[in-house]
Amino acid sequence: MQMPDPDQALIAGRDAIASALAKIVPSGVISDPAALAPWSCDALTAYRQLPLAVVLPRTTDEVAAVLAWCHQAGVKVVARGAGTSLSGGSLPLADGIVLGMARFNQVLAIDYDNRCAVVQPGVTNAAISEAVSGRGFYYAPDPSSQIACSIGGNVAENAGGVHCLKYGTTTNNLLGVEIVLIDGTVLRLGGTAPEAPGYDLLGLVCGSEGMLGVVTEVTVRILPRPPHQRAMLIGFPAVEAAGECVASIIGCGIIPAALEIMDRPAIHAAEAFVNAGYPLDVEALMIAELDGGIEEIDDALAVIATIAARHGATLCRPSEGEAERLLFWAGRKAAFPAVGRVSPDYYCVDGTIPRRMLGPVLGRITAIAAAEGLGVANVFHAGDGNLHPLILYDASIPGDLEKAERVGSRILETCVEVGGVLTGEHGVGIEKRDLMHKQFTPVDLAQQQRVKAAFDPRALLNPGKVFPALSRCAEGGAEHVHGGRLSFPDLPRF
């Protein structure tokens, strides 16, 4: 993965830039190289570089003033929440600043009558549910990183989670945002009302990966907690059988609250890490959760058990009590760190495929990794076909990272080949940037870049991400000029 060559003039002006920004945000600018190390990467830790400076604003007015100054000075800006992006979405730029939103960490208002909460973008996902739990409410999207990831980052990436099969991703639970554009303009999109006239700019902002503006306030939908929840562990002798079972469950009309699958390597890692009581003699383990009334749950679990038996399931074990249900999920939620204990490094892939293709694609994933001599552990949101293969490698071995990248790219290409898409919830960032042409035509990409240019005409917000490197200038309606010399100077210009 390569980022654009940095502007050496901006790097040379680091001290002047930091000094100017410190006047806008007193006691909120970090520019010492040693102190910048914590901001050198996000959760895609294979790629690192120090930013020019980190700015930590406290108010929307400060964010607006910083962005307006950067717009005027031509300084690039990467907004950062908790830094949990797995696609390199908040990887800093050597010639740009990081705008850290960690100080925006307050729950501003809770409206139980209208079932919504207004929070600042630095509030963690789990903290929203904690804030409303006293009245029996919660925030439905639940990424596995929910104790750390911020709601602002969730909006940027349209984050999902294990319960998004039934309750939707961030975009389905987002009601409004306050967003600051690169020139300092402050906009409010949406609000507490369920519908709004005009273009769906809120839908455009959700999942825009920090390329259109900086979110400074978020209004989300909160829901009453279901009266009852029950999960069931279902073991299969083959991963393909588990994938086929998923399609059958959804096809019969049952929409579980969650439907997750782990393969043997992930099962063994999670069990050793959490002691959740997972069976170790199966090739795939499904966690199906139902919520609602007791009779409804019991009926649906009985149907699921029957379907699973038709697909060769060797185990169907419902949770007995809330403690056991939470233990079932503790293993799944800890699968990523658990795999980190059995492999020096892993590369997490995020792609989505049609449910009917789960079986064949999982087999291909194993073969793709084996061809490069690498292992893979599969953990995925089976209900909506969102795959998370964890490619196991050792960064200390020369060439291993490159092997993992090749495996990841081939897996994502396979997702597109079978009718899926490049991402489900982690975003494009730098990880999938140069694969975008596999899913989108040049016309598609050009249209997306025109939208980007409407919000950020100088491409100062999170540049180097999402759009393939070789397409940016021409498809953005601009031309690269190096050293004052035009390419093909003999051609007429219009």
Image: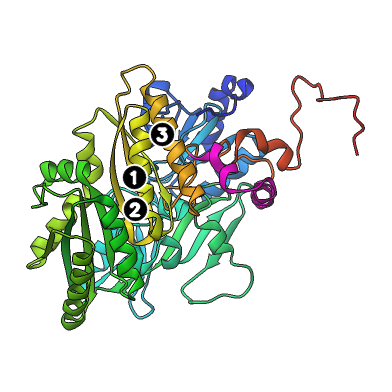
Q: Earlier in the sequence, mark 3 or mark 2?
A: 2
Name the spot of residue 429 as percent of width and height, x first. 49, 41
The span picked out in magenta is: 432-456
**Dot 3: within a 10 Å radius of its alpha carbon, few (fewer than 14), some, or many (20 or more) residues?**
many
**CA gap, disc 3 to disc 1?**
14 Å
Give percent across and percent down for residue 378.
Answer: 29, 45
Where residue 363 is drawn, which disc sits there? Answer: 1
Expressed as whole percent of the image width and height from the top left, the position of residue 363 reads: 34, 45
Q: Label 3, label 2: how many angstroms apart (C-alpha)?
A: 18 Å
Which residue is found at the position 59% from the left and 41% from the top? 467
**Mark 3 sits on what residue?**
407
On-image quarter of the C terminus: top right
**Residue 316 versus residue 4: which sits nearer the camera?**
316
Sort mark 1 into few (<14), some (14-19) or many (20+) by Cα contacts within 10 Å: few
The residue where tag 2 is placed is 359
Q: Is residue 393 left or right of residue 159?
A: left
Give SS at disc 2.
Answer: helix
Q: Secondary structure at mark 1?
A: helix
* Residue that appears at 22% across and 38% down: 339
277 up-or-down from 49: above or below:
below
Q: Nearer the viewer, residue 11 or 60?
A: 11
Measured from the top left, where is residue 312 in percent x and y? 19, 60
Up-down: is 368 above or below 302? above
